[in-house]
Amino acid sequence: MFTGIVTDVGRVRAVRDTNRDRRFEIETAFDLSTVDLGASIAHAGCCLTVVEKGEGWFAVEVSGETLSKTTLGQWGEGDPVNLERAARVGDELGGHIVSGHVDGVGEVISVESEGGSHRVQIRVPRPLHRFIAPKGSITVEGVSLTVNEVEDDVFGVNLIPHTWDVTTLGRLRPGSKVNLEIDMLARYLARWRETA
């Protein structure tokens, strides 16, 4: 489990297709002596398992299913990646409860400056739009955000200068693809309503 609070922006240092999956090596500022093999780390909102590590880097393997359902299939050497280590019992829950399971890929419609912040509108693949509500939570590229408004299949968020500067969201442009995870509570409420 995660909280959607990015703690490092890593960088893809190598990409290699294997006979099973695609392997990514990620440069990071994390203290890797505290990261075990088999540990879960969220990468742009996608939970992946550490399979190898070295000085200042670790490796993950990504299945074809994950590559087809997330933005990870577009990653290349040098690309920045939002990273978050798994939450531990007793950690501050600064964002919201995030599973690291990407629900779909959205498309940025607009990015506009608003004071020191940036207002971003994102189109959501249907039927995910029905899980998004004003003032609810959503995860965009692994970042916990508050939904400002929703109109049909487009929602808006406001990125404060800190978030814009210390995550990859400062690189968003119209047409950018983003990993989305809907609020877990919304998912279960919708399922309960369907089956009640």
Image (cartoon, rainbow, N blue to C red):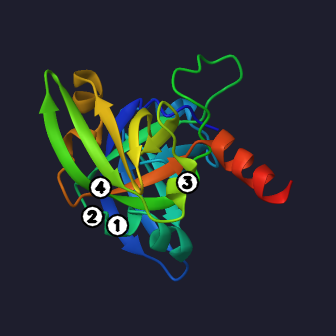
Give the image location of residue 178, x and y in percent.
35, 55
Pair 2/1: label in front: 2
Q: How many neighbours does mark 1 have within 10 angstroms: few (below 14), some (14-19), or many (20 or more)?
A: some
| Residue at the disc numbered 2 | 76
Name the foreground residue: 61 vs 75.
Answer: 75
At mark 4, the secondary structure is strand
Amino acid type, label 4: Arg
Amino acid type, label 3: Arg
Q: CA distance from mark 1 to mark 3?
A: 36 Å
105 up-or-down from 57: above or below = below
Extreme residue toward the bottom, this view: 19
Name the foreground residue: 39 vs 89.
Answer: 89
At mark 2, the secondary structure is loop
Give the image location of residue 180, x and y in percent.
46, 52
Name the residue located 70 percent from the left edge and 51 percent from the top edge.
190
Name the residue located 51 percent from the left edge and 40 percent from the top edge.
133
Q: Which disc number belongs to residue 130? A: 3
Q: Earlier in the sequence, mark 2 or mark 4?
A: 4
| Residue at the disc numbered 4 | 13
Amino acid type, label 1: Val
59 up-or-down from 166: above or below = below
Q: CA distance from mark 3 to mark 4?
A: 37 Å
Mark 2 touches mark 4? (CB < 8 Å) = no
Amino acid type, label 2: Gly
| Residue at the disc numbered 1 | 15
Q: Quadrant of residue 127?
A: bottom right
